[in-house]
Image (cartoon, rainbow, N blue to C red):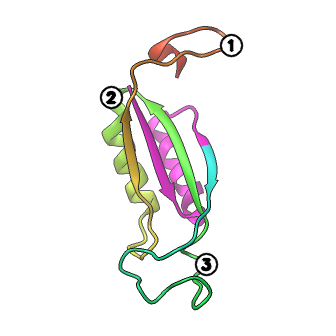
Amino acid sequence: MTKLEAIVRPNKFEAVKAALIELGVEGMTVSEVRGHGRQKGHTEVFRGREYDVDLLPKIKLELVLSDETVEKAIEAISNAAYTGKIGDGKIFLYNVGGAIRIRSKERDLAAI
C-alpha cells in the first residue's frame, strides 16, 4: 500500500476528485494548506509586495491506495490539476506498512 498526498489548487479540486472517482477511489482526506513565502522561480513575490491568489491557499488530498493503483492515480491527478503556472502543487508518496479501520478492525487493503 502507498499513501499519496497531492497539493492542488482549490479551483482544480472538483476535476481531480472526478478523475479519482473514475479510477474507483472510494475516499480521501481533504484539508487546506496555508503558508507564506516565495514560490520557486517566482523571486519577485514576497510577503506584502505582490499577491497572486493562485499561489495561496492550496488543498491537500490524502489517499491510501493499493500499489497497483498508484501510477494511475498519479496520472489522473497530474492531468486534472495541471495549469503549467507557478504554484502548481506536488505529489508525495509514502510506503504504508499497514492500515486498520478502527470501527470494523479490518486490516490492510480491506481497511481502505
- Describe the element under mark 1 as helix, strand or loop: loop
| Between 68 and 22, the one nearer to me in the picture | 68
Residue at image location 59% in from the left, 55% down from the top: 14
The span picked out in magenta is: 1-29
Residue at image location 45% in from the left, 58% down from the top: 80
Q: Residues within 10 Å of mark 2 (few under 14, many from 20)?
A: few
Q: Residues within 10 Å of mark 1 (few under 14, many from 20)?
A: few
Residue 60 seen: yes
Which residue ends up furthest to the right in the rendered image?
Answer: 103
**Residue 54 placement (x, y as % from top left):** 56, 75
**Residue 70 placement (x, y as % from top left):** 35, 37
**Residue 55 placement (x, y as % from top left):** 54, 74
Q: Quadrant of residue 102?
A: top right
Residue marked by disc 1? 103
Q: Is residue 104 above or below residue 76?
A: above
Q: Identify which amino acid the numbered label 3 is placed on.
A: Val
Q: CA distance from mark 3 to mark 2?
A: 35 Å
Q: Mark 2 or mark 1: name the one nearer the start of the chain.
A: 2
Is 6 left or right of 102, judged from the image as shown? left
Mark 3, mark 2: which one is toward the viewer?
A: 3
- Describe the element under mark 2 as helix, strand or loop: helix
Q: CA distance from mark 2 to mark 1?
A: 24 Å
Is 74 left or right of 21, judged from the image as shown? left
Q: Mark 3 or mark 2: name the one nearer the start of the chain.
A: 3
Q: Are marks 2 and 1 in contact (CB under 8 Å)?
A: no
Residue marked by disc 3? 53
Residue 50 is covered by the magenta coloring: no
- Describe the element under mark 3 as helix, strand or loop: loop
Residue marked by disc 2? 67
Q: Residues within 10 Å of mark 3 (few under 14, many from 20)?
A: few
